[in-house]
Image (spheres, helix red, strand yellow):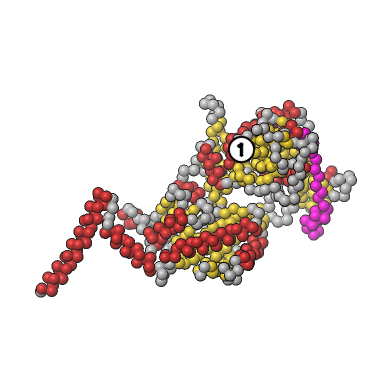
Amino acid sequence: MVEIATLLCGVLGTLATLALIKIVDIILEHFLNKTIFGRIWSAMTRSLKKFRTRLNPIVIRFQFRAQLESNDPLKVKEGLAKLIESLSEKYKGKIVFSPIKWTDTDRTGSVNATFNNREFRIDMDISSEYRDYDPEKGIFEAQEAFEVSESVAFSIEVNFPLQSIDPMLLSLSSLTNFITEQLKEMHTIIKFSKGLFTLAPIKADLTMDHWIKEKQFDVSLLLKARDNILVNLYPKKAEIVFPTLQIDEKVSEYLEATILNYYL
Amino acid sequence: MSSSSDFSTIYSQTRQPIVGVAFFLLPLRKGKINFVKLREKLEGRYDEMELYEQELERNVLEGEELYVPEVFKNEESENLSLKTTVDKVILTPSSLFGKATIDRPMTLAYRGYKILVIATTQVHFLIIRDDKTKRHYLVILGSRANSKSLFTSLNKFLERIGLFAVTAQLDPEKIDLIRELLHGELIDTTLDRFPSPKIKIKRIIGRGFQDEPSYIQDASVSSVHQHMFEYIDHIGIERSKRHVVTLSEDGLVRFYSSTTHKEFEWFLRNNIFPHLKQIKKIPEGVPLIAFTTSDDIFEEEEE
């Protein structure tokens, strides 16, 4: 009987402490717009979640597109093989590339690059389109329609524990830089797209309204920051878009915040 | 051939839809271009490029015969030639306005024959010095294909007198900035270079969609390749004019609404030149000769 009373006291005491902490937080939030214990609690869970990524690494994909002069898709394929060959030669000992694997359609090539003890999977998608013969462009009507390629979409996938986000981004940034510089060397006309990070799956609950929750709508959220960086939240993925291919500290700041808030 | 006064009417008064591609005109040596001398040098220039029979035959399918009508044959040479002539150049108060004739070959199929046809096209051009950017521009007033062929031939003339034209670029942000500055209402936009492999290009057609969330979302991930928009030119309160214009990444500017070459020139000066970017240098192989002869087109820059 005494034991139960002690236990009850203990439970009540804990509950009272928690309630007190909550009340203090509410008062602090009301007057100072700050919470102390809440912050400590979220900091604790955060470090635990961060730690967990050592065993269960974060998977991220970085994508960009290179627009080149119009060419036969097979010529573009040859060009990409040459690109990897040149990079492998140029950064011998620094980066190790696996042989390129092409899909049956010859439109997607995959290669693994080991750089700074981390493996990056690079997918290269050759975009192509069919065009009608344009009498203004050539003398002869050789074909009615033909296939041309004007761009290649690069996807670089990497997994990493959160602790090593900075060295990972540094390597990714260098790798992107090596690829783009080599492309510039090989092509006279070249334009690059914006950079896009995709993080999936995410745990974002954007259903702020009861009705949205009830009807199970897919909600997306577009967040545009002043630094020209954009965060798109979709039900299953988050995208971070930035204007150039330079992965700077601003980009890494947004990326880390997205990981902490929606991925972990 | 039209007289000078007729030709200056074409420049300042004839209203028509106009399309032009802007290029940078680079002087091969320091100095200001003397437009009077440049006009003299350009007018009447003639260039010929041979079109070889073998090259023609190669493109004729088996069982077909290439037929070349007499009118296209050359008296002196076996080979056919494609001519470029600069027919007329006038000095306007602010620029040089010229007309060139170019030949373009094409083939037509006719019951077992391939008939070669050389079509002649007249293309106008402008040479402008902009005091604000302190640079010279060549604007070829024609479609992309016509401007490309005249650009190649015209450069052969220009090279000999110490000038060289190079392609220009309007960056995607600049295309949108120009639209914004003119309060343009979007009509037709091509968004290019989406970063992921699944969607490459999107085209949006409508009216005034520049503030629509779906457009903003697409535009935030991609790059503007081309904008067609409508803007009101407030010349005076009573004479506001509505224009529909297309701006493209490669420096192409197209007016769908009727305009004069003179107005087109001023549109470029005020809205395009300040944002145009040079992406190419003078190619190696173009001789950088010091032009010091008496008929030099350059004069000392005024301090």
Kindly state the secondary structure of the residue where label 1 is placed.
Answer: loop
In magenta stretch: residue A264: no
Is residue B8 found left or right of A225 in the rendered image?
A: right
Classify mark 1: residues with Cα within 10 Å, few (<14), some (14-19) or many (20+).
few
Residue A135: horizontal and vertical position, in percent? 71, 49
Residue A46 sits in quarter = bottom left
Q: Which residue appears at 63% of the width and 43% of the height?
A: B252
Of residue A142 and residue B87, the one placed in the foreground of this image is B87
List the single residue furthest toward the left: A1
Type of amino acid at the residue the image marks with label 1: Thr
Of residue A165 and residue B256, the one placed in the foreground of this image is A165
How many numbered discs, if any? 1
Q: Which residue appears at 52% of the width and 55% of the height?
A: A246
| Quadrant of the rendering where the N terminus of chain A is positioned | bottom left
Q: Which residue appears at 41% of the width and 53% of the height?
A: A221
Q: Which residue appears at 71% of the width and 29% of the height?
A: B8
Residue B30: horizontal and vertical position, in percent? 70, 40
User: Circle 1 is placed at which residue position?
Assistant: B133
Residue A77 seen from this side: no
Q: Where A217 falls versus B260 (above or below)?
A: below
Is residue B215 found left or right of A183 in the rendered image?
A: left
Residue A207 sits in quarter = bottom left
Q: Chain of mark 1?
A: B
Residue B119: horizontal and vertical position, in percent? 76, 43
List the single residue furthest toward the front: B303
Is residue B32 found left or right of B44 in the rendered image?
A: left
Q: Which residues are magenta?
A: B39-64
List the single residue furthest toward the top: B238
| Quadrant of the rendering where the C terminus of chain A is positioned | bottom left
Residue A98 seen from this side: yes
Of residue A38 and residue B175, the one placed in the foreground of this image is A38
Q: Where B152 falls versus A90 (above or below)?
A: above
